[in-house]
Amino acid sequence: MFRNIWAIRSGRLAILIIGIAVLLVALGPLLAPYDPLEGSELVLSGPSFQHPLGTDYLGRDSLSRLLAGAPLSIASAVQVGVIGLVVGAVPGVLSVYSGRFFEWVTLRLIDTLIALPFLVFAVAVTALLGNALTQAMIVVGVLTAPAFYRVARASTLAVANSPYVEAAQLAGADVSWIVRKHVTGKVFPPLAITLASTLGIGLIAVAALSFLGIGVQPPAPTWGGMLASDLKYLTFRPFAPLIPSIPIIVLVWAFNLLADLIRDVSGESGRRLVARSRRRRGLTSKQGV
Amino acid sequence: MSLLLTTETAPETVLRVTDLRIVNEVDEVVLVDGVDFELRRGQVLGIVGESGSGKSISLRAVLGLLPAGLAIAGGTIELFGDDTSRFTNVDWNHVRGSGITAVFQDPGSYLNPSIPVGKQVAEVLRVKRGLGRRAAKAQALTLLDEVRIHDPELVFRQYPHELSGGMLQRVLLAIAVSLEPRILIADEATTALDVTVQAEVLDLIVDLTERHGLSLIVVSHDLAVVAQVADAVVVFRDGVIVERGSTAQVLHDPQHEYTRLLVSEHELYGLDRFTRDVAAHVS
């Protein structure tokens, strides 16, 4: 699948952007030219050679804070996605096989989660459990679970009623065999799409929460937190909110693009799409499909 | 089970269906009403009847795979002497595959389209027989060869969409006999195939039946198919059995009006007439 996405031009772009983001998570704090927490006399300055993106209201270097904030911002988006995936997809598959009672209970629970407003609920829970990033991320992750649950359940239902599952039952297959052999393969592509788009949602949620002062506490650098503090000094540095916004926007866009491409390459029309862009690059369409 | 000890003189009954009633739980329509039949070891039973006559539903009940919403409302099904109404899921998983199995119409949809067919044959052997990867593959190749696939190595790696209907039905037969079951149900297994392939597959089913000592139930709405292979025939109509007897008896001296209609239609449009005409032309 990776190779197929790479074969499409926009797929290379998405993978490149996400690759840079991964590098930033690993190396961001090391690349920062200044200590992201260290203030200086030079407050609210514009771009200069010493400070390419200027300094904030405490004289801290914006570039350093952007780089140092990358791991927290991106890693918590991933945390959100993974929590949502596990909390949603596993009961989603099991709901088809674990009897009416489990099915009914999980369906109602998921309905409830859908009804809860995202940020308000996250604010409420952190008020209850303590204001820390992990709590906030678990809440947001659980709130993204309905999407995974629905997707996993729908594809499992489609497979569960297919003749080839019946054929497996005729060979004496038990549920675990059917799930391993037939369900996982069918559930994976739609889940990958959901995961990719949830990562975008997660990134925005993390930024929004830290903008509201929930999760990461100042002075720790995060993209959302930078946005919040820069907004107060808009008259001095009107471009400043763009510094964290642009990476957020680009990364969310890349995640969504990736989600679209995963959808496109899995399936019949996807094969044609890949073949076409291979031909355009003078490659045969036979390789690695 | 004491089945292996019984003498050859009276082949024991492997399947006995008594007064089976199947209803649709939603609208309480009775689909099958008081059906009895039995199958002895080594016997080939033909089941004939039009669509909706209850023949497939009855066999699904025998396999424990009734579609959702349908339920057995009365009667008993005994598989190898055990009443299946007391079977748990584990019992069913045990008896299906290694005791009773089936092949159906439209073989393409009974294979997972995204897994090579050979792997699907091997998988059954790995899970149910506990064979290793390599042993399972070797066994699968033998099975593919046994169902007269010419290039087992090639077919092993192919996906269902790369194979014809006849080939797919062969693969499914390979899976069906892989666990050495004692009953095989061929429910319209040759219906969707064209005539020459139909004959080949039917031939293969009979051959496998003899070689593995299977008891066979052939379901078809085509009298010709049943006439070629079955020892005994039951005729379904509207959820009841309207006629039963040895194949020769039912075909040559049908008692029920519906069977008579089937036989006469077959004489009008069937293969025999066609071959007779061709023979007349040639001579």
Image (cartoon, helix red, strand yellow):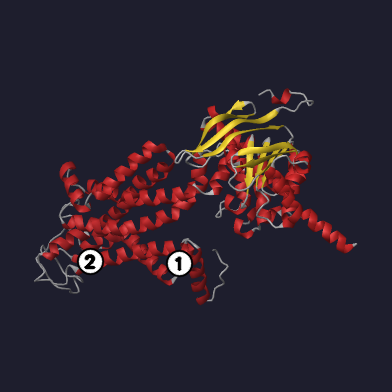
Q: Residues under labels 2 and 1: Cα distance?
A: 27 Å
Q: In this view, does B125 lie above or below B264?
A: above
Q: Residue A6 carries which label?
A: 1
Q: Residue at x 22, y 58 (%)?
A: A207
* Horizontal relation, residue A257 to residue A172: left or right: left
Identify the residue at image location x=66%, y=52%.
Answer: B191
Q: The residue under label 1 is which amino acid type? A: Trp
Query: Mark 2 — on which chain does it sit?
Result: A
Q: Judge left or right: residue B270 versus residue B82.
A: right
Please give the residue where the numbered disc 2 appears in the rendered image. A245
> Residue A272: x, y in percent?
51, 69
Indicate the quadrant where residue A222 lies.
bottom left
Question: Which comes sooner in the sequence, label 2 or label 1?
Answer: 1
- Residue sticking out furthest to the front: B257
| Residue shown at the point (49%, 69%) measured from the top left | A274
What secondary structure is found at the residue carrying circle 1?
helix
Q: Could you tell me which secondary element the residue under label 2 belongs to?
A: helix
